[in-house]
Image (tube, rainbow, N blue to C red):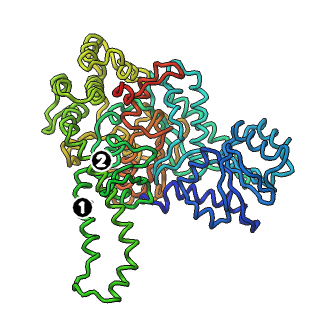
Amino acid sequence: MAAGSDHGLKRIVWKRIKETIIADCRKSEVWKILILDPFTTKLLSSCCKMSDLMAEKITIVEDLYKSREPVPEMKAIYFMTPTAKCVDAFIADFKTKPKYKAAYVYFTDYCPDDLFNNMKLYCAKYIRVCKEINMSFMPQEAQVFTCDNPDAFKNIYSPKSQDKKKTLDTLADQLVTLCATLDEYPGVRYKKDSSMENAKILAELVDNKLAQHYELDDSGKKKGKTQAQLLIVERGLDPVSPILHELTYQAMAYDLVDIQNDTYTYKSKDGSEKQALLNEDDMLWVKLRHKHIAEVSEQIPKMVKEISASKKQPDGKITISNLAQMMKKMPAFRKQLTEKTVHLQLAEDCMKHFSNNVEKLCKAEQDLAVGSDVDGVKVKDPMRTLLPVLLHPYSTHDKIRAVLLYIFSLSGTTDENLSKLIQHVKIEDEREFILNWKELGVPIITTSFFSRKPTRRDRSQEEKYNLSRWTPVIKDVMEDAVENKLDTREWPHQSECPAAWNSSGAVSARQKHKASSQDERRSGARLIVFIIGGVTFSEMRCAYEVTQAVKSCEVIIGSSHILTPTSLLNDIKALSKGPMETFTIEERSNA
Protein backbone atom coordinates (compact mmCIF):
# COMPACT_ATOMS: atom_id res chain seq x y z
CA MET A 1 0.00 0.00 0.00
CA ALA A 2 2.09 2.88 -1.18
CA ALA A 3 1.15 6.38 -0.23
CA GLY A 4 -0.59 8.22 -3.00
CA SER A 5 -3.75 9.94 -3.96
CA ASP A 6 -5.38 6.75 -5.27
CA HIS A 7 -5.82 5.22 -1.87
CA GLY A 8 -4.89 8.09 0.38
CA LEU A 9 -7.26 9.45 3.02
CA LYS A 10 -8.34 12.32 0.75
CA ARG A 11 -9.34 9.88 -1.98
CA ILE A 12 -11.31 7.77 0.53
CA VAL A 13 -13.10 10.86 1.90
CA TRP A 14 -14.05 12.13 -1.57
CA LYS A 15 -15.29 8.65 -2.53
CA ARG A 16 -17.46 8.56 0.61
CA ILE A 17 -18.88 12.03 -0.13
CA LYS A 18 -19.68 10.89 -3.66
CA GLU A 19 -21.39 7.72 -2.41
CA THR A 20 -23.60 9.65 0.03
CA ILE A 21 -24.24 13.30 -0.80
CA ILE A 22 -23.55 13.20 -4.54
CA ALA A 23 -25.35 9.88 -5.12
CA ASP A 24 -28.55 11.35 -3.64
CA CYS A 25 -28.25 14.40 -5.87
CA ARG A 26 -27.80 12.33 -8.99
CA LYS A 27 -31.29 10.94 -8.55
CA SER A 28 -32.70 14.28 -9.66
CA GLU A 29 -31.14 15.75 -12.77
CA VAL A 30 -31.40 19.41 -11.79
CA TRP A 31 -28.46 21.64 -10.87
CA LYS A 32 -28.10 22.37 -7.16
CA ILE A 33 -26.51 24.78 -4.71
CA LEU A 34 -24.10 23.47 -2.07
CA ILE A 35 -24.04 25.26 1.28
CA LEU A 36 -21.13 24.68 3.66
CA ASP A 37 -19.95 25.81 7.11
CA PRO A 38 -16.24 26.65 7.77
CA PHE A 39 -15.35 23.05 8.71
CA THR A 40 -17.03 21.38 5.73
CA THR A 41 -15.58 24.05 3.39
CA LYS A 42 -12.12 23.04 4.58
CA LEU A 43 -13.00 19.35 4.37
CA LEU A 44 -14.25 19.55 0.78
CA SER A 45 -11.45 21.77 -0.46
CA SER A 46 -8.96 19.26 0.98
CA CYS A 47 -10.26 16.43 -1.19
CA CYS A 48 -11.84 17.88 -4.34
CA LYS A 49 -11.83 20.83 -6.73
CA MET A 50 -14.67 23.04 -7.94
CA SER A 51 -14.52 21.25 -11.30
CA ASP A 52 -15.26 17.93 -9.52
CA LEU A 53 -18.38 19.51 -8.01
CA MET A 54 -19.46 21.04 -11.32
CA ALA A 55 -19.21 17.58 -12.89
CA GLU A 56 -21.74 16.43 -10.28
CA LYS A 57 -24.25 19.19 -11.17
CA ILE A 58 -23.39 21.49 -8.29
CA THR A 59 -23.41 24.98 -9.72
CA ILE A 60 -22.67 27.27 -6.75
CA VAL A 61 -20.94 26.77 -3.39
CA GLU A 62 -22.12 29.16 -0.67
CA ASP A 63 -21.18 29.96 2.94
CA LEU A 64 -23.89 29.00 5.44
CA TYR A 65 -23.14 31.98 7.70
CA LYS A 66 -23.14 34.70 5.04
CA SER A 67 -26.25 36.42 3.76
CA ARG A 68 -27.24 34.81 0.45
CA GLU A 69 -29.63 35.72 -2.32
CA PRO A 70 -32.72 33.48 -2.32
CA VAL A 71 -33.01 31.12 -5.32
CA PRO A 72 -36.50 29.71 -4.76
CA GLU A 73 -36.49 27.58 -7.93
CA MET A 74 -33.34 25.62 -6.90
CA LYS A 75 -32.71 22.81 -4.44
CA ALA A 76 -29.96 23.25 -1.85
CA ILE A 77 -27.60 20.70 -0.30
CA TYR A 78 -26.54 21.57 3.24
CA PHE A 79 -23.35 19.84 4.39
CA MET A 80 -22.64 21.00 7.95
CA THR A 81 -21.54 20.18 11.50
CA PRO A 82 -24.37 19.36 13.92
CA THR A 83 -24.01 22.49 16.07
CA ALA A 84 -26.67 24.92 17.31
CA LYS A 85 -25.09 27.71 15.24
CA CYS A 86 -25.36 25.72 11.98
CA VAL A 87 -28.87 24.49 12.66
CA ASP A 88 -30.05 28.04 13.53
CA ALA A 89 -28.59 29.35 10.27
CA PHE A 90 -30.36 26.55 8.40
CA ILE A 91 -33.70 27.26 10.08
CA ALA A 92 -33.34 30.97 9.26
CA ASP A 93 -33.20 30.03 5.55
CA PHE A 94 -36.69 28.49 5.66
CA LYS A 95 -38.53 29.82 8.71
CA THR A 96 -40.18 32.98 7.34
CA LYS A 97 -39.66 32.85 3.58
CA PRO A 98 -37.91 29.81 2.11
CA LYS A 99 -34.72 30.67 0.21
CA TYR A 100 -34.72 27.41 -1.76
CA LYS A 101 -37.19 24.96 -3.23
CA ALA A 102 -36.01 22.09 -0.98
CA ALA A 103 -33.18 21.07 1.35
CA TYR A 104 -30.98 17.98 1.38
CA VAL A 105 -29.28 18.02 4.79
CA TYR A 106 -26.08 16.09 5.62
CA PHE A 107 -24.40 16.27 9.01
CA THR A 108 -20.73 15.39 9.54
CA ASP A 109 -21.65 13.53 12.72
CA TYR A 110 -24.50 12.51 15.03
CA CYS A 111 -27.08 15.32 15.37
CA PRO A 112 -28.42 15.80 18.93
CA ASP A 113 -32.17 15.26 19.28
CA ASP A 114 -32.97 18.81 20.42
CA LEU A 115 -31.39 20.30 17.27
CA PHE A 116 -33.07 17.74 15.04
CA ASN A 117 -36.48 18.40 16.59
CA ASN A 118 -35.99 22.13 16.13
CA MET A 119 -35.34 21.60 12.44
CA LYS A 120 -38.41 19.41 12.10
CA LEU A 121 -40.55 21.97 13.86
CA TYR A 122 -39.76 24.81 11.45
CA CYS A 123 -38.62 23.19 8.21
CA ALA A 124 -40.10 19.69 7.98
CA LYS A 125 -41.92 20.27 4.70
CA TYR A 126 -38.76 21.49 2.91
CA ILE A 127 -36.37 18.73 4.04
CA ARG A 128 -36.14 15.97 1.43
CA VAL A 129 -33.18 14.12 3.00
CA CYS A 130 -31.53 14.31 6.42
CA LYS A 131 -28.51 12.07 7.00
CA GLU A 132 -25.48 11.78 9.27
CA ILE A 133 -22.48 10.73 7.21
CA ASN A 134 -19.85 10.22 9.95
CA MET A 135 -16.99 12.34 8.75
CA SER A 136 -15.78 14.92 11.22
CA PHE A 137 -12.01 14.65 10.69
CA MET A 138 -9.76 16.41 8.19
CA PRO A 139 -7.77 14.32 5.67
CA GLN A 140 -4.46 16.18 5.68
CA GLU A 141 -2.35 13.87 3.53
CA ALA A 142 -2.51 10.32 2.14
CA GLN A 143 -1.70 8.86 5.60
CA VAL A 144 -2.28 11.83 7.92
CA PHE A 145 -5.48 13.22 9.46
CA THR A 146 -6.26 15.94 11.99
CA CYS A 147 -9.30 16.88 14.03
CA ASP A 148 -8.76 20.50 12.93
CA ASN A 149 -8.72 21.65 16.54
CA PRO A 150 -5.49 23.41 17.68
CA ASP A 151 -7.36 24.65 20.78
CA ALA A 152 -7.56 21.05 22.04
CA PHE A 153 -4.00 21.49 23.35
CA LYS A 154 -4.98 24.32 25.69
CA ASN A 155 -8.30 22.69 26.64
CA ILE A 156 -6.62 19.42 27.63
CA TYR A 157 -3.36 20.61 29.21
CA SER A 158 -4.10 24.00 30.76
CA PRO A 159 -4.56 23.71 34.55
CA LYS A 160 -7.22 26.44 34.21
CA SER A 161 -9.22 24.61 31.55
CA GLN A 162 -12.91 23.92 32.09
CA ASP A 163 -13.27 22.08 28.78
CA LYS A 164 -11.00 19.08 29.13
CA LYS A 165 -13.72 16.44 29.38
CA LYS A 166 -15.75 17.98 26.57
CA THR A 167 -12.67 18.23 24.29
CA LEU A 168 -11.68 14.59 24.84
CA ASP A 169 -15.28 13.58 24.14
CA THR A 170 -15.29 15.51 20.84
CA LEU A 171 -11.92 14.02 19.82
CA ALA A 172 -13.34 10.55 20.55
CA ASP A 173 -16.35 11.26 18.29
CA GLN A 174 -14.00 12.41 15.54
CA LEU A 175 -11.84 9.29 15.87
CA VAL A 176 -14.93 7.12 15.58
CA THR A 177 -15.90 8.88 12.33
CA LEU A 178 -12.36 8.22 11.02
CA CYS A 179 -12.74 4.51 11.78
CA ALA A 180 -16.23 4.48 10.21
CA THR A 181 -14.97 6.18 7.03
CA LEU A 182 -12.15 3.62 6.78
CA ASP A 183 -14.68 0.88 7.60
CA GLU A 184 -12.49 -0.30 10.47
CA TYR A 185 -13.41 -1.56 13.94
CA PRO A 186 -9.98 -1.53 15.59
CA GLY A 187 -8.72 -2.92 18.86
CA VAL A 188 -7.79 0.08 21.04
CA ARG A 189 -4.59 0.41 23.10
CA TYR A 190 -3.02 3.34 24.96
CA LYS A 191 0.33 4.24 26.52
CA LYS A 192 0.10 3.82 30.28
CA ASP A 193 1.53 6.74 32.23
CA SER A 194 1.57 7.14 35.99
CA SER A 195 1.32 10.94 35.83
CA MET A 196 -1.09 11.47 32.91
CA GLU A 197 -4.55 10.00 32.36
CA ASN A 198 -5.64 11.56 29.05
CA ALA A 199 -4.66 8.62 26.81
CA LYS A 200 -6.51 6.20 29.08
CA ILE A 201 -9.64 8.39 29.20
CA LEU A 202 -9.65 8.90 25.41
CA ALA A 203 -9.10 5.17 24.78
CA GLU A 204 -12.12 4.32 26.98
CA LEU A 205 -14.29 6.93 25.25
CA VAL A 206 -13.30 5.79 21.75
CA ASP A 207 -13.81 2.14 22.58
CA ASN A 208 -17.30 2.71 24.03
CA LYS A 209 -18.35 4.95 21.15
CA LEU A 210 -17.04 2.44 18.59
CA ALA A 211 -19.05 -0.32 20.26
CA GLN A 212 -22.20 1.85 20.10
CA HIS A 213 -21.52 2.81 16.49
CA TYR A 214 -21.07 -0.78 15.34
CA GLU A 215 -23.78 -2.27 17.60
CA LEU A 216 -25.99 -2.81 14.58
CA ASP A 217 -25.03 -1.91 11.07
CA ASP A 218 -27.41 -1.33 8.17
CA SER A 219 -27.85 -5.05 7.52
CA GLY A 220 -28.94 -5.60 11.11
CA LYS A 221 -25.78 -7.59 11.87
CA LYS A 222 -23.21 -6.72 14.51
CA LYS A 223 -19.87 -5.73 13.00
CA GLY A 224 -16.88 -7.70 14.25
CA LYS A 225 -13.38 -6.33 14.82
CA THR A 226 -11.39 -5.67 11.64
CA GLN A 227 -7.64 -6.12 11.03
CA ALA A 228 -6.82 -2.78 12.62
CA GLN A 229 -5.26 -1.45 15.79
CA LEU A 230 -5.61 2.07 17.23
CA LEU A 231 -2.83 3.34 19.52
CA ILE A 232 -3.38 6.46 21.63
CA VAL A 233 -0.39 8.34 23.07
CA GLU A 234 0.23 11.74 24.64
CA ARG A 235 2.54 14.48 23.42
CA GLY A 236 4.69 14.04 26.54
CA LEU A 237 5.79 10.59 25.29
CA ASP A 238 8.33 12.37 23.06
CA PRO A 239 9.06 16.03 23.87
CA VAL A 240 12.31 15.95 21.84
CA SER A 241 10.96 15.51 18.29
CA PRO A 242 8.93 18.75 18.19
CA ILE A 243 11.86 20.83 19.54
CA LEU A 244 14.81 19.58 17.46
CA HIS A 245 15.77 21.24 14.19
CA GLU A 246 14.70 18.65 11.60
CA LEU A 247 16.60 18.49 8.30
CA THR A 248 14.08 16.59 6.17
CA TYR A 249 12.49 18.89 3.59
CA GLN A 250 8.87 19.24 4.77
CA ALA A 251 9.66 19.46 8.50
CA MET A 252 12.53 21.88 7.89
CA ALA A 253 10.49 24.15 5.60
CA TYR A 254 7.59 24.45 8.08
CA ASP A 255 10.03 25.14 10.93
CA LEU A 256 12.27 27.75 9.28
CA VAL A 257 10.19 29.33 6.49
CA ASP A 258 6.96 31.25 7.07
CA ILE A 259 4.40 28.89 5.51
CA GLN A 260 0.80 29.84 6.33
CA ASN A 261 -2.08 27.43 5.60
CA ASP A 262 0.27 25.28 3.49
CA THR A 263 0.95 28.30 1.26
CA TYR A 264 4.54 29.30 0.51
CA THR A 265 5.03 32.92 -0.56
CA TYR A 266 8.19 33.74 -2.50
CA LYS A 267 9.62 36.33 -4.86
CA SER A 268 10.09 35.32 -8.50
CA LYS A 269 13.03 36.45 -10.65
CA ASP A 270 11.18 39.54 -11.86
CA GLY A 271 10.60 40.58 -8.25
CA SER A 272 6.87 39.86 -8.20
CA GLU A 273 5.40 37.99 -5.23
CA LYS A 274 4.11 34.49 -5.96
CA GLN A 275 2.35 31.85 -3.94
CA ALA A 276 2.52 28.07 -4.14
CA LEU A 277 0.32 25.55 -2.37
CA LEU A 278 2.28 22.68 -0.80
CA ASN A 279 -0.09 19.75 -1.09
CA GLU A 280 -0.45 16.36 -2.75
CA ASP A 281 -1.52 17.81 -6.09
CA ASP A 282 2.14 18.78 -6.42
CA MET A 283 3.72 15.41 -7.21
CA LEU A 284 7.23 16.79 -6.81
CA TRP A 285 6.38 17.84 -3.23
CA VAL A 286 5.11 14.30 -2.53
CA LYS A 287 8.32 12.88 -3.94
CA LEU A 288 10.66 15.21 -2.03
CA ARG A 289 8.92 16.06 1.25
CA HIS A 290 10.46 13.25 3.36
CA LYS A 291 13.95 13.42 1.86
CA HIS A 292 16.92 14.99 3.64
CA ILE A 293 17.61 18.58 2.56
CA ALA A 294 21.04 17.50 1.23
CA GLU A 295 19.32 15.17 -1.29
CA VAL A 296 16.66 17.73 -2.18
CA SER A 297 19.26 20.44 -2.88
CA GLU A 298 21.09 18.02 -5.14
CA GLN A 299 18.05 16.67 -7.02
CA ILE A 300 16.09 19.81 -7.95
CA PRO A 301 18.79 21.58 -10.03
CA LYS A 302 19.34 18.28 -11.90
CA MET A 303 15.61 18.09 -12.70
CA VAL A 304 15.53 21.68 -13.96
CA LYS A 305 18.47 20.90 -16.26
CA GLU A 306 16.75 17.75 -17.57
CA ILE A 307 13.60 19.68 -18.49
CA SER A 308 15.56 22.46 -20.17
CA ALA A 309 17.57 19.86 -22.12
CA SER A 310 14.44 17.99 -23.20
CA LYS A 311 13.05 21.22 -24.66
CA LYS A 312 15.99 21.64 -27.02
CA GLN A 313 15.84 19.86 -30.35
CA PRO A 314 18.56 17.21 -30.64
CA ASP A 315 19.49 17.85 -34.27
CA GLY A 316 19.23 21.62 -34.16
CA LYS A 317 16.90 21.69 -37.19
CA ILE A 318 13.74 23.65 -36.66
CA THR A 319 10.89 22.31 -38.76
CA ILE A 320 7.23 23.24 -38.62
CA SER A 321 6.31 19.83 -37.19
CA ASN A 322 9.05 20.18 -34.54
CA LEU A 323 7.68 23.58 -33.60
CA ALA A 324 4.13 22.24 -33.46
CA GLN A 325 5.32 19.44 -31.17
CA MET A 326 7.08 21.96 -28.93
CA MET A 327 4.02 24.23 -28.81
CA LYS A 328 1.88 21.28 -27.72
CA LYS A 329 4.36 20.47 -24.98
CA MET A 330 4.74 24.06 -23.76
CA PRO A 331 1.97 24.07 -21.09
CA ALA A 332 3.34 20.84 -19.64
CA PHE A 333 6.89 22.25 -19.73
CA ARG A 334 5.73 25.41 -18.06
CA LYS A 335 3.93 23.49 -15.32
CA GLN A 336 6.95 21.24 -14.71
CA LEU A 337 9.33 24.18 -14.63
CA THR A 338 7.07 26.19 -12.31
CA GLU A 339 6.85 23.26 -9.87
CA LYS A 340 10.59 22.85 -9.89
CA THR A 341 11.23 26.59 -9.58
CA VAL A 342 9.04 26.68 -6.45
CA HIS A 343 11.03 23.90 -4.84
CA LEU A 344 14.35 25.32 -5.98
CA GLN A 345 13.37 28.53 -4.18
CA LEU A 346 12.02 26.78 -1.06
CA ALA A 347 15.05 24.50 -0.75
CA GLU A 348 17.28 27.57 -1.17
CA ASP A 349 15.35 29.35 1.61
CA CYS A 350 15.84 26.33 3.90
CA MET A 351 19.56 26.14 3.09
CA LYS A 352 20.01 29.85 3.75
CA HIS A 353 18.70 29.42 7.31
CA PHE A 354 20.69 26.22 7.66
CA SER A 355 24.06 27.72 6.75
CA ASN A 356 23.40 30.92 8.75
CA ASN A 357 22.95 29.25 12.12
CA VAL A 358 21.03 25.96 12.14
CA GLU A 359 24.00 23.86 11.02
CA LYS A 360 26.06 24.78 14.10
CA LEU A 361 23.07 24.25 16.40
CA CYS A 362 22.27 20.81 14.97
CA LYS A 363 25.40 19.06 16.24
CA ALA A 364 24.72 20.14 19.84
CA GLU A 365 21.00 19.33 19.51
CA GLN A 366 21.67 15.84 18.13
CA ASP A 367 24.26 15.06 20.83
CA LEU A 368 21.80 16.13 23.55
CA ALA A 369 18.85 14.27 22.01
CA VAL A 370 20.66 11.02 21.21
CA GLY A 371 22.90 11.09 24.31
CA SER A 372 26.06 10.37 22.33
CA ASP A 373 28.19 12.09 19.72
CA VAL A 374 28.78 11.23 16.06
CA ASP A 375 31.34 8.56 17.01
CA GLY A 376 28.94 6.93 19.45
CA VAL A 377 30.79 8.26 22.52
CA LYS A 378 28.34 8.86 25.40
CA VAL A 379 27.74 12.51 26.37
CA LYS A 380 28.88 12.46 30.00
CA ASP A 381 28.30 16.14 30.76
CA PRO A 382 25.42 17.60 28.73
CA MET A 383 26.21 21.09 30.14
CA ARG A 384 29.46 21.11 28.13
CA THR A 385 27.40 20.46 25.00
CA LEU A 386 24.89 23.19 25.85
CA LEU A 387 27.28 26.00 26.91
CA PRO A 388 28.68 26.86 23.44
CA VAL A 389 25.08 27.31 22.23
CA LEU A 390 24.28 29.69 25.10
CA LEU A 391 27.46 31.71 24.54
CA HIS A 392 26.88 32.10 20.78
CA PRO A 393 24.57 34.95 19.65
CA TYR A 394 21.73 32.64 18.52
CA SER A 395 18.14 33.85 18.80
CA THR A 396 16.43 33.51 22.20
CA HIS A 397 14.02 31.07 20.55
CA ASP A 398 16.86 28.74 19.48
CA LYS A 399 18.48 28.96 22.91
CA ILE A 400 15.18 28.02 24.60
CA ARG A 401 15.01 24.96 22.33
CA ALA A 402 18.58 23.95 23.26
CA VAL A 403 17.93 24.43 27.00
CA LEU A 404 14.83 22.24 26.73
CA LEU A 405 16.80 19.48 24.98
CA TYR A 406 19.39 19.67 27.76
CA ILE A 407 16.67 19.29 30.43
CA PHE A 408 14.97 16.43 28.52
CA SER A 409 18.35 14.66 28.22
CA LEU A 410 18.63 14.62 32.03
CA SER A 411 14.91 13.95 32.62
CA GLY A 412 14.77 17.16 34.62
CA THR A 413 17.22 19.45 36.38
CA THR A 414 17.50 21.15 39.79
CA ASP A 415 15.70 24.36 40.66
CA GLU A 416 19.00 26.16 41.12
CA ASN A 417 20.42 25.00 37.79
CA LEU A 418 17.22 25.96 35.98
CA SER A 419 17.31 29.49 37.44
CA LYS A 420 20.89 29.92 36.17
CA LEU A 421 19.89 28.73 32.68
CA ILE A 422 16.89 31.06 32.60
CA GLN A 423 19.10 34.03 33.57
CA HIS A 424 21.64 33.05 30.93
CA VAL A 425 19.03 33.01 28.15
CA LYS A 426 17.51 36.20 29.61
CA ILE A 427 13.93 34.86 29.80
CA GLU A 428 13.25 35.62 33.48
CA ASP A 429 9.80 37.00 32.56
CA GLU A 430 9.01 34.15 30.18
CA ARG A 431 10.15 31.09 32.06
CA GLU A 432 6.79 29.44 31.17
CA PHE A 433 8.36 28.36 27.86
CA ILE A 434 10.28 25.86 30.00
CA LEU A 435 8.30 25.38 33.24
CA ASN A 436 4.93 24.65 31.61
CA TRP A 437 6.16 21.37 30.10
CA LYS A 438 5.29 19.86 33.48
CA GLU A 439 1.61 20.16 32.47
CA LEU A 440 2.36 17.56 29.75
CA GLY A 441 3.87 15.20 32.32
CA VAL A 442 7.42 16.00 31.18
CA PRO A 443 9.81 16.28 34.19
CA ILE A 444 11.47 19.72 34.26
CA ILE A 445 12.53 20.06 37.89
CA THR A 446 13.71 16.92 39.61
CA THR A 447 15.29 16.14 42.93
CA SER A 448 17.01 12.87 41.99
CA PHE A 449 19.57 12.39 39.25
CA PHE A 450 18.74 8.74 38.76
CA SER A 451 15.99 8.43 36.21
CA ARG A 452 15.47 5.45 33.94
CA LYS A 453 15.27 6.47 30.29
CA PRO A 454 13.34 4.15 28.00
CA THR A 455 15.60 1.99 25.85
CA ARG A 456 15.62 2.95 22.20
CA ARG A 457 16.14 0.80 19.12
CA ASP A 458 19.71 0.73 17.85
CA ARG A 459 19.66 2.57 14.53
CA SER A 460 23.40 3.22 14.21
CA GLN A 461 23.42 1.18 10.97
CA GLU A 462 20.65 3.30 9.46
CA GLU A 463 22.27 6.69 10.12
CA LYS A 464 23.21 8.46 6.90
CA TYR A 465 23.65 12.03 8.14
CA ASN A 466 25.57 13.13 11.23
CA LEU A 467 23.14 15.99 11.87
CA SER A 468 20.04 13.75 11.61
CA ARG A 469 20.73 10.91 14.02
CA TRP A 470 17.60 11.32 16.13
CA THR A 471 14.55 9.19 15.30
CA PRO A 472 11.13 10.11 16.75
CA VAL A 473 10.01 7.77 19.56
CA ILE A 474 6.76 7.10 17.69
CA LYS A 475 8.71 5.23 14.99
CA ASP A 476 9.90 2.71 17.60
CA VAL A 477 6.30 2.39 18.75
CA MET A 478 4.99 1.82 15.20
CA GLU A 479 7.64 -0.82 14.48
CA ASP A 480 7.04 -2.55 17.82
CA ALA A 481 3.29 -2.58 17.14
CA VAL A 482 3.76 -4.08 13.67
CA GLU A 483 6.16 -6.68 15.08
CA ASN A 484 3.85 -7.47 18.02
CA LYS A 485 6.48 -6.36 20.51
CA LEU A 486 4.49 -3.77 22.48
CA ASP A 487 4.54 -4.72 26.16
CA THR A 488 0.95 -5.14 27.36
CA ARG A 489 1.88 -3.73 30.78
CA GLU A 490 2.94 -0.46 29.15
CA TRP A 491 0.35 -0.61 26.37
CA PRO A 492 -2.84 -2.04 27.90
CA HIS A 493 -5.60 -3.24 25.58
CA GLN A 494 -8.70 -1.15 26.10
CA SER A 495 -10.40 -3.86 24.09
CA GLU A 496 -9.19 -7.05 22.50
CA CYS A 497 -7.24 -6.65 19.27
CA PRO A 498 -7.99 -8.97 16.35
CA ALA A 499 -5.97 -12.19 16.06
CA ALA A 500 -3.51 -10.81 13.53
CA TRP A 501 -2.24 -8.34 16.14
CA ASN A 502 -2.06 -10.84 18.99
CA SER A 503 -0.25 -13.95 17.80
CA SER A 504 3.45 -14.51 18.15
CA GLY A 505 4.26 -14.45 14.43
CA ALA A 506 6.13 -11.15 14.22
CA VAL A 507 6.86 -9.15 11.10
CA SER A 508 10.10 -7.20 11.07
CA ALA A 509 9.62 -3.59 10.15
CA ARG A 510 13.19 -3.27 8.97
CA GLN A 511 14.28 -6.46 7.21
CA LYS A 512 13.02 -7.56 3.82
CA HIS A 513 10.92 -10.56 4.78
CA LYS A 514 9.14 -13.47 3.17
CA ALA A 515 5.39 -13.26 3.61
CA SER A 516 4.47 -15.38 6.60
CA SER A 517 0.96 -16.62 7.26
CA GLN A 518 0.80 -13.85 9.89
CA ASP A 519 1.70 -11.37 7.17
CA GLU A 520 -0.92 -12.66 4.77
CA ARG A 521 -3.60 -12.57 7.42
CA ARG A 522 -2.70 -9.01 8.16
CA SER A 523 -2.39 -7.98 4.52
CA GLY A 524 -4.17 -4.66 4.12
CA ALA A 525 -4.25 -4.19 7.90
CA ARG A 526 -4.08 -0.71 9.36
CA LEU A 527 -2.29 0.70 12.34
CA ILE A 528 -3.85 4.02 13.38
CA VAL A 529 -1.79 6.19 15.75
CA PHE A 530 -3.35 9.19 17.51
CA ILE A 531 -1.20 11.68 19.43
CA ILE A 532 -3.02 13.86 21.98
CA GLY A 533 -1.55 17.38 21.85
CA GLY A 534 -0.33 17.67 18.26
CA VAL A 535 1.74 15.71 15.73
CA THR A 536 5.04 16.87 14.18
CA PHE A 537 6.07 16.62 10.52
CA SER A 538 8.88 14.22 11.44
CA GLU A 539 6.34 11.88 13.10
CA MET A 540 4.13 12.09 10.01
CA ARG A 541 7.14 11.01 7.94
CA CYS A 542 7.56 7.92 10.18
CA ALA A 543 4.09 6.65 9.21
CA TYR A 544 5.13 6.57 5.54
CA GLU A 545 8.56 5.06 6.29
CA VAL A 546 7.14 2.17 8.33
CA THR A 547 4.39 1.53 5.74
CA GLN A 548 7.05 1.49 3.03
CA ALA A 549 9.21 -0.98 4.98
CA VAL A 550 6.43 -3.39 5.94
CA LYS A 551 4.20 -3.22 2.85
CA SER A 552 1.57 -5.48 4.46
CA CYS A 553 0.38 -2.83 6.91
CA GLU A 554 -0.63 0.78 6.34
CA VAL A 555 0.19 3.20 9.16
CA ILE A 556 -2.08 6.23 9.53
CA ILE A 557 -1.18 8.97 12.00
CA GLY A 558 -3.28 11.82 13.32
CA SER A 559 -3.82 14.36 16.07
CA SER A 560 -5.92 17.35 17.00
CA HIS A 561 -3.56 19.46 14.83
CA ILE A 562 -0.09 19.62 13.26
CA LEU A 563 2.71 21.27 15.24
CA THR A 564 5.74 23.33 14.40
CA PRO A 565 8.37 24.07 17.07
CA THR A 566 7.25 27.72 17.24
CA SER A 567 3.53 26.94 17.50
CA LEU A 568 4.15 24.34 20.23
CA LEU A 569 6.33 26.67 22.31
CA ASN A 570 3.70 29.42 22.06
CA ASP A 571 1.01 26.93 23.14
CA ILE A 572 3.16 25.70 26.04
CA LYS A 573 3.76 29.25 27.25
CA ALA A 574 0.05 30.11 27.02
CA LEU A 575 -0.94 27.18 29.29
CA SER A 576 -0.50 29.27 32.44
CA LYS A 577 -2.44 32.21 31.03
CA GLY A 578 -6.15 32.79 31.46
CA PRO A 579 -8.49 32.16 28.52
CA MET A 580 -7.90 35.45 26.71
CA GLU A 581 -4.20 36.19 27.33
CA THR A 582 -1.79 34.95 24.70
CA PHE A 583 1.64 36.20 23.77
CA THR A 584 3.70 34.66 21.00
CA ILE A 585 7.37 34.31 20.20
CA GLU A 586 7.06 36.62 17.18
CA GLU A 587 5.45 39.35 19.26
CA ARG A 588 8.19 38.99 21.83
CA SER A 589 10.96 39.40 19.29
CA ASN A 590 9.24 42.50 17.90
CA ALA A 591 8.60 43.97 21.33
In the rendered structure, the answer to whether residue 553 lies left or right of residue 348 reads right
- Residue ID for mark 1: 301
Q: CA distance from mark 2 to mark 1?
A: 18 Å
Rendered location of residue 163, percent (x, y): 59, 25
- The residue lying at 33 percent from left, 16 percent from top is 445
Crowding near pointer 2: few (<14 within 10 Å), some, many (20+)?
many
The amino acid beneath tag 1 is: Pro
Residue 206 picture quarter: top right
Please state which of residues 97 and 469 is positioned toward the viewer in this rendering.
97
Residue drawn at (46%, 45%), measured in percent from left and top?
Answer: 261
Against 559, residue 490 (above or below) is: above
**SS for dot 2:** loop
What residue is pinned by disc 2? Answer: 248
Name the amino acid, label 2. Thr
Q: Nearer the viewer, mark 2 or mark 1?
A: 1
Q: Quadrant of residue 435?
A: top left
Nearest to the observer: residue 190 or residue 123: 123
Residue 72 can be seen in this image: yes
**Secondary structure at numbered mark 1:** helix
